[in-house]
Image: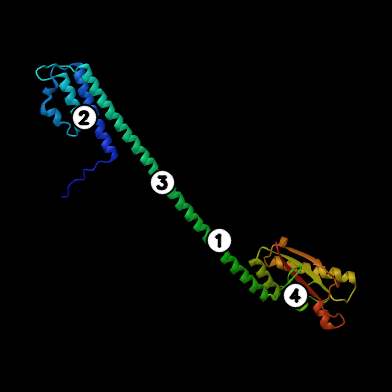
């Protein structure tokens, strides 16, 4: 078996010192009250009961006892000077122990403060690293989102204009009946594709502008163009796009993109333009 560890912790040392002081205080009390048996009669059993007595305290008791009971002159009580000396030694030792205890407390407080500062610094470092990771993830996500948005715009054959991103749907795509605002197909492929795009990008607002050719009256064409824009709006709402994201207006025959003197030109002018803008 290994030898036991005899090193005392600061608290154990202070406790032992306190017990020693209490022991000598008891001896002092015995001398002061005047026991019938002199201190020498305590014998080996008294000294054996406190093996932790320090040399300094033992010397103080011996000198006090010698002054109180010199050889050849027995006496049951300590003299006043001897009792005062023993009390002074005891108080000095108690003061020293209190100083040691206070120093230990200061050391513990300093150690705790150092550890607290270390933990705070580590937490701050971890928080900073976490913020950097979040920012990097956001940047990566934003880059991926813009890349996907660009691919989606390309699939819609959209182009950038001062009024927003323009997606132009011709009459052949929407299949309006000539001179009417009714869609021939209930679910045109072009509008279904656009609705899917808008659902994926809910931050986009939609402006629908209806256009006609120059055939018919100007006022009638203005009303017809607006009705066609509203028809597209209703269909987009039915396909899952929020109504408050969509605004519809008619432009009539005022903004042709082709020659109205030719049938092909008039067909291109009969259109609904879709502008996408940030909300």
Near mark 1 (Cα within 10 A), the count class, few <14, some 14-19 or many ≥20, is: few
Q: Nearer the viewer, residue 1 or 195?
A: 1
Residues at marks 3 and 1, CA–CA distance in whole angstroms? 32 Å
Q: Are marks 3 and 1 in contact (CB under 8 Å)?
A: no
Q: Is residue 227 left or right of residue 20?
A: right
In the picture of the structure, the residue carrying the numbered disc 1 is 135
- Read off the residue under disc 4: 169
Q: Residue furthest right?
A: 217
Element on which disc 2 rests = helix
**In the rendered structure, are the residues bearing label 1 and label 2 in contact, judged by CB atoms less than 8 Å apart?**
no
Q: Residue at x 17, y 24 (%)?
A: 63
Q: Residue at x 16, y 22 (%)?
A: 65
Q: Residue at x 17, y 20 (%)?
A: 67
Closest to the camera, between mark 4 and mark 3, is 3
Read off the residue under disc 3. 114
Label 2, on which residue? 57
Q: Quadrant of the C terminus?
A: bottom right
Q: Measured from the top left, where is residue 78 in percent x and y?
A: 19, 18
């Amino acid at each position: 078996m290994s030898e036991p560890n005899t090193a005392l912790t600061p608290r154990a040392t202070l406790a032992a010192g306190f017990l020693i002081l209490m022991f000598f205080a008891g001896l002092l009390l015995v001398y002061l009250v005047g026991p019938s048996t002199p201190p020498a009669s305590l014998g080996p059993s008294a000294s054996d009961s406190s093996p932790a007595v320090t040399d300094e305290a033992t010397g103080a008791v011996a000198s006090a006892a010698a002054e109180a009971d010199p050889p050849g002159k027995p006496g049951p009580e300590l003299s006043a000077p001897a009792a005062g000396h023993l009390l002074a030694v005891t108080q000095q030792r108690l003061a020293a122990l209190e100083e040691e205890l206070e120093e230990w407390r200061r050391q513990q407080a300093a150690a705790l403060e150092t550890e607290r500062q270390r933990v705070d610094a580590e937490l701050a470092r971890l928080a900073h690293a976490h913020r950097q990771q979040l920012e990097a993830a956001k940047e990566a996500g934003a880059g991926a989102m813009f890349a996907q948005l660009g691919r989606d715009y390309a699939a819609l054959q959209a182009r950038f204009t001062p009024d927003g991103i323009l997606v132009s749907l011709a009459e052949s795509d929407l299949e309006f009946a000539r001179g009417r605002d009714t869609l021939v197909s209930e679910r045109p492929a072009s509008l279904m594709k656009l609705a899917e795009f808008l659902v994926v990008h809910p931050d986009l607002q939609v402006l629908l502008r209806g256009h006609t050719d120059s055939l018919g009256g100007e006022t009638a064409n203005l009303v017809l163009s607006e009705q066609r824009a509203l028809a597209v709006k209703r269909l987009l709402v039915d396909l899952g796009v929020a109504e408050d994201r969509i605004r519809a207006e008619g432009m009539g025959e005022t903004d042709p993109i082709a020659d109205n003197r030719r049938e092909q030109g008039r067909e291109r002018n009969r259109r609904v333009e879709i502008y996408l803008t940030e909300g």
